[in-house]
Image (tube, rainbow, N blue to C red):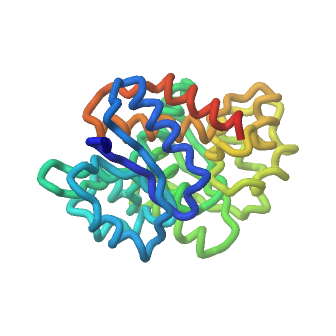
Amino acid sequence: MSSTRQAAVLGSPIAHSLSPVLHRAAYAELGLSDWSYDRFEVDEAALPGFLEKLGPQWAGLSLTMPLKRVVIPLLDEISATAASVEAVNTVVFTADGRRLGDNTDIPGMLAALRERGVEQVERASILGAGATASSALAALSRICTGEVTAYVRSDARADEMRGWGERLGITVRTAAWEDAAAAFEAPLTVATTPAGTTDALAAAVPDRPGTLFDVLYEPWPTPLAGAWADRGGAVVGGLDLLVHQAVLQVEQMTGRSPAPLAAMRKAGEAALAAR
């Protein structure tokens, strides 16, 4: 007998995604034995056709790259949070067939920081300028009372980050990537770059660092996160972000709250340890 409710994560590549582990752990803890959560390799070209084929048993979707922006025209409505960064990572299907888009990365970042005692900072730094950096900037716009310095590799990226700052209502100063070690002078540094990019900066971690939010979760710890922890700094990792944003997705898709954060984190940690 098939499951009565379905959800899944879409993206390309998708084989590495931990989302099925987290969501299935939540279903088990909540007693939702008739729910399933899978992963599907879907790129930009295939997304419209995939959505059209979904039946009424579908509750929602998690979206990863490269789908977070291209999905927007295919939805009936998106939240103000998603609109603020033009990125949707969560789609919920209503009983009357409407498609609602949201972004749980931003509140997920805030929840992960709050869990480590970071509720407000006077300034912050961002390493990188991609899609995750814009979400980080949106999160910082809610807790940073001063300016954010973004360390980037090109003038185009610098212009983009300043533009996001204007849109989000936060002052953004940009600096060259060659000066990225100066990022660590801020009480909060958010590293949003791909694996390996910040490895050379590990030697520049100061003796008394503030808080590092490194959005990577594999491999973990990154050399930067390891050096940060060795010097007594607080570290928030990519698994923290992944779990907190998934908690919000589970709550939206199932209508059950609160989602089981501890069980989801434990499942994620076990899955990473087994890789």
Q: Residue at x 77, y 25 (%)?
A: 232
Horizontal side of 106 relative to 130 (left or right) equals: left
Can the viewer see residue 143? no
Horizontal side of 272 relative to 166 (left or right) equals: right
Locate the C terminus and report the quarter of the image it occupies.
Answer: top right
Q: Residue at x 42, y 27 (%)?
A: 28
Name the quadrant containing residue 252: top left
Q: Nearer the viewer, residue 50 or 82?
A: 50
Locate the N terminus and report the quarter of the image it occupies.
Answer: top left
The percent position of residue 220, horizontal first and vertical second, equals 73, 40
Horizontal side of 40 relative to 48 (left or right) equals: right
Q: Nearer the viewer, residue 95 or 173?
A: 95
The percent position of residue 50, horizontal first and vertical second, equals 35, 67
Can the viewer see residue 44? yes
The percent position of residue 134, horizontal first and vertical second, equals 50, 57
Name the quadrant containing residue 196: bottom right
In the displayed structure, 33 sits above or below 152; it is above
Q: Residue at x 24, y 51 (%)?
A: 93
In the displayed structure, 254 sits above or below 178; it is above
